[in-house]
Image (cartoon, coloured by chain):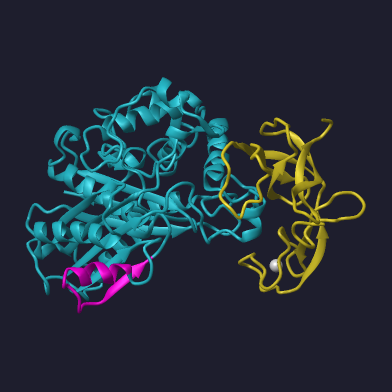
Amino acid sequence: MPAVEGWFAMAGEPQLLGTRCTSCGTFFFPPSDGFCRNPECQGTEFEPAPLSRRGTVWSYTDNRYQPPPPYMSPDPFEPYTIAAVELAGEGLVVLGQMVAGELVAIGDEVEVVLDTLFEDDSNEYVMWKWKKVGA
Amino acid sequence: MTAVAVAGVGIHPFGRFDATVTEMGGHAVKAALTEAGIRNGGFQAAFCGAAYAGVAAGHKVLGALGLTGMPILDVEAGCASGAAALLLGAQAIWAGQYDTVLAYGIEKMPKGIIRSSFFEPWREEAGLAATPSYFALRAQRLMRESGVTKQHLAEVVVKNRANGAHNPDAMFRKPVTAEDVLASRVVCEPLHLWMLCSPNEGAAAVVLRRADLAGPGAVRLTGIALRSHLPGAVLGEATPMAGLVDDDFPSPTALAATDAYEQAGVAPADLDVVECQDTDAARELLSYEELGLCPRGDAAKLFDEGATQMGGRVPVNPSGGLLSKGEPLGASALGQVVELVRQLRGDAGPRQVDGPRVALAHVVGRGANAAVSILAR
Ligand SMILES: [Zn+2]
């Protein structure tokens, strides 16, 4: 089941589900409601906006220490890489973990996948992650 | 508009102590008031910066000293909390409301990686909220844009720890080599453990007074500005998860610096000494560019020229910086001001910069608050 409900497609191709302001067209992720964050815009209506599946790495790092709870750490803790990815179509940068074991560099092309974030006794919780295109 | 002078400064060393945050605050406040030669009734308002010290923490400090009755404002602005307190104090004097005010900052940080209520729980659960990794994302960009290498990052630590060896108020007073720094474990690429400052404890206090009531030689606070990030800035200091891509956005630090230079009527070339936010080694180098000490993209070049070393054109972090002192959030900005006032007075002992006349202090942090203060004699 999704670790966060409604932010990514659980059926079909993996895809982040953002929103778009119906007044000014600005994309938001995580999905926005309430007030448009474009300061020039008075919009309060948003439409669902599936986002580009691919993007390029704007920056990245690897977490080699265990973040404190509530981070849902595997036991034992495994270092993981995070990437800030500039989406191909929207001009947004979206942060996410890389799939395990992948090295990455600024400018690399990556695509969104769904992968296990953590498991408990009854469920596997999935989250979006980034994966190198062609890897 | 009347000018604002610094009538007294005081500091409780930064480190780890058995003392309560209230006791440390009292120590710094007493020292500043003593230096200013005033007792209760001698200041008309108090502004206390703190982020983790709890409700009315500044009130408790003055309560423990028997110095209450005046307005006491507790101020929180992340890593810029102490600067926010100083800003409010200066503005009150500029507005003509008070002659003398107390600005102080206190903190006793939890140990280890700092959790912050700034982040949504889902982001922490997903492992996307830890502070050092945001520093690392920014550091990776700087390495790409400005010719900064891991060796530069290590050498910044070497510089600041060498300076800090002469600062009795610093937490770490042992010089280190670049080999030592690079041998410390990687926390998140490219940052090794020793390239990151330690959250810790301490307090600092500054008494501000109308310049015409202070002595003729008093150091003046000639500019102070605090700015937040512009909407849509990537990472910035706000560390949003998603933002518009545009590296041309002025950062909060650049915005605050522009305002402070204008107020003070000085340019970056006029600076003789700087204390800047070296939460991590890359953050110091980025500040060179954002504060205008060098053109965009030239941070590594400026460092390689030795300009920011002791004896260079504009020594940066003669106190040892946060890399030596550690970072008690509410106190760190005022700790910088204490250092620069001592530098400008010529009272900095073995870490004295040669004859400085204009000095700049810079902090930046959570909530994308950046503050720049300019002091002169
Ligand atoms: Zn809009």
As drawn, which residue projects farthest toward the front?
Answer: A121
**Is residue B295 or residue B299 the one in the foreground?**
B299
**Left/right of residue B322 with respect to residue A98 in the rendered view:** left
At a point 24% along the width and 67% down the height, the residue shown is: B61
Question: What percent of the width, then of the height, locates residue A30?
Answer: 71, 59
Quadrant the N terminus of chain B occupies = bottom left
Where residue A104 appears, as percent x and y from the top left, is 70, 32
Depicted B236 relative to depicted B194: above or below: below
Considering only vertical position in the picture, is B62 above or below A28? below
Q: Colour of chain B?
A: cyan
Q: Quadrant of ligand 1?
A: bottom right
Instruction: Looking at this view, name the residue that lies furthest to the bottom.
Output: B69
The yellow-coloured chain is labelled A
B97 and B80: which one is in front? Answer: B80
Residue B318: give x, y in percent of width and height. 26, 36
Considering every residue shown, the one lying at the far top of the view is: B179
The magenta segment is B57-75
